[in-house]
Image (cartoon, rainbow, N blue to C red):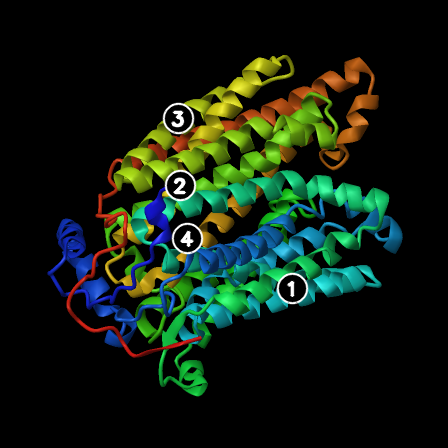
Amino acid sequence: MNASVSTVVDHPISSPDDPSSAEKDVAARDLEASTPSIQAAQAAQSPPADQQLQDFGPKTPLTPVRRVCVFLGIFVTLFLAALDQTIVTTTLPSIAKEFNNFSDISWVGTAYLLTTTAVQPLYGVAADLAGRKRAMMFACSVFMLGSALCGAAQSMIMLIIARAVQGLGGSGIIALSMILVADIVPLRSRGTYQALVALIFAIAAVLGPLLGGAFADSLTWRWAFYINLPIGAVAMAMLIAFLHMNRRKNVSLATNLKSLDYSGILLLIVSIVMILLGLNWGADAKFAWNSAVILVLLIVGGVVGIGFLLNEWKFAKRPVVPLRLFGTISMALTYLQVFILGFIFLGLLFFLPLYFQAVNGASAVRSGIDLLPYVIVGSLGAVVSGLLMSRFGTYKEFIVAGWLVGTVSAGLLITFDEYTSRAKVNGVLVLQGLSMGLTVNTLLLAVHAQLINKGDIALSTSLWTFLRTFGGVFGIAVGGAFVQSSLSKAGASEYAQNIKAIADLAPEVRAPVLRAFVVGLHQFFMLLTAMSAVSFVASLFIKKASMGSRHGEKNEGPAAPAPMVAE
C-alpha cells in the first residue's frame, strides 16, 4: 500500500462554474460532449450552492492510529452486514424444523433482500442531511436491533419481521461504508480501499454459509444472529470514539425534514418492493410468471417507478435520486454497467453453485469450495487493480479490459455441461473472477471522478450501491426463470427446489433432468455473454476524468467551504 495513502488533505469544494482547476477543465469537456438538452437538465437540477460547497470529510487529518481504528470500525460493520446476506442459507433447515414451518422459510432471505434494496438510495439523502456519522450510527443500531430480534424470535413471522428490520440497518451500513471511504480517502488513492471492500464481500460470501452451518450443527442457529452483537458493539465504539466528520452548521432537524422528498420516497419504496416481490415469487416458482399476481406486481411496480422518475424530474425540490447524476452520456453508460455488473456477479454467485450441486452432484459445502477460484481471483484482481489505479491515476483501461475478459469468459461458460472437466471449470472461473476484479471497484471510482458537483458523492455512491444490488436481484430472478422453464419442459420442475433428490434417481431418469438444468443454465450464460458485450462497448465511451494527485485531490477553486461543525 502506498505510503501516501495515509495522508488526508482537507479541501474545499467549489461551485461547478469555477474553471480554475484541472478537474473542472476535464468536467467542462465532458459537458461539452453531451447534448444541449442534457446540459440544460443538469443545470436545472443543480444542487443549492451550500450543498455544492459542503465538505463532509474528517474535521481534522487522521493520525495513523485514528486511521486504523476508523477503517477497522467501518470494515468490521461492513463485514457483518455482508455476512448476513449469506449466513442464513445453511441455517434455514434448522429454523424451519424448530418452528415447524417450511412453507414460509424463503421469506427469511427475501425479507432481508427487500428492505436492503428498497432503502439504499435513501441513505445517500440521510448522509447529506444528518451527517455521515449520525447516519452510520443509526444504521448500525437498527442492524444490531434486528440481529437481537432475530436471535430471540419465537415464531417464523417474528423472525421474518426481524430480518426486515435487520435489512434496513444493513442497507445503510453497506452504502455509508462506501460513502465514508469516499469522504476520507482522496480519489487517486481510493481504489486501494475499495479493493478492501470487495475483499470483505468475497470473504463474507465464502464464510457465511460455513459459519451458519457450524452454528446450526454445533450450537444453535440463533448464534448466526447473536454473533453480530458483541462484534458490532466494539466496531460502533471505535467509530464513536475516532470518527469525527464534518456536517452542515445551523440547519435544524425540522428544516431538513421539511426538505425531504416524501412523495419520491413513497413511490420509490412501493415500486421496488412490488418489482422485487414479483421477481422473487416468479423465480421461486411460487407463482407462474404469467399469473395475475406476478403480472400485477411487475406492471404496477413499473408504472409506479415511472411515476417516481417523473416526480424526481418535475416536482421534487430535493430529489432522492437527482437526474443530474445521469447528466452526461458517459455517466449514464457508467451506471448502466453498474447494473449489469450486479446482474452478472450475483447471478453467477447463485447459479454456479447450482451447476456444481445439480449437474456435478456436489454438496453445499463442496460447491462453496468449487467457487473459490472465482472469489479469490476476483478479490485479488480488485486489490491489484486498486493499487494500479492509485499508482497511475486512471480507470477506463481497467474497465475496458475487465469487460473484454468478461465477454470471453461468459462465452466459455456456455460450453459447461455434464462432462466438463474440473480443470476447464477452474480456468473459466479464474477468467470470470479477473473480469469482476477489474470492474467492481473501478466503476465506482469512474462515477466519483466524473461528478460535476462533488457534493453529490453520497447520492452517487448510494445510487451505485442500489443499482448493483438491484441488478443482482434481476440476475437471480432471470436465471431462475430460465432454469425453471427448462425443467418444466422436461417435466422435472419439482427438482428445482429439491436438488439432493436428483442423486437418488435411476440413471435413465437422472440424465434428462441433468440435461434440463444444463439447457436452462446455457440460456442464462448466453444472456450474460450478450450483456458483457454490451458493457464492453459501453465502456469504450466512458470519458476520462482526472483522479487528482496521489497525496489528495486538488482544490476545485478558491471559494471557501460552507460553515461546518464536527459530528
User: How far is mark 1 from mark 4, CA to CA?
Assistant: 28 Å
Q: Residue at x 25, y 63 (%)?
A: 453
Q: Position of residue 120 (x, y in %)?
A: 50, 60
Q: Give the mark nearest the N terminus, 4 or 2.
A: 2
Mark 4 highlights which residue?
464
Mark 2 highlights which residue?
1
Q: Depth-wise, is mark 4 or mark 2 nearer the camera?
A: 2
Relative to 226, 294 lies left or right: left
Looking at the image, is 547 positioned above or below residue 136?
A: above
Q: Residue at x 53, y 65 (%)?
A: 239
Looking at the image, is 489 positioned above or below residue 40?
A: above
Mark 3 highlights which residue?
405
Relative to 486, 72 lies left or right: left
Mark 1 highlights which residue?
233
Instruction: Give SS at disc 2.
Output: loop
Q: Which mark is residue 15?
A: none
User: How far is mark 2 from mark 3, CA to CA?
Assistant: 26 Å
Q: Depth-wise, is mark 1 or mark 4 nearer the camera?
A: 1
Dot 4 amino acid type: Trp
Q: Give the mark nearest the N terminus, 2 or 3.
A: 2
Dot 1 amino acid type: Ala
Q: Quadrant of the N terminus?
A: top left
User: How far is mark 1 from mark 3, CA to CA?
Assistant: 42 Å
Q: Residue at x 68, y 64 (%)?
A: 146
Q: Position of residue 59 (x, y in %)?
A: 37, 70
How many marks overall? 4
User: How far is mark 4 from mark 2, CA to CA?
Assistant: 25 Å
Q: Depth-wise, is mark 1 or mark 3 nearer the camera?
A: 1
Q: Give the mark nearest the N terminus, 1 or 3.
A: 1
Q: Give the mark nearest the N terminus, 1 or 2.
A: 2
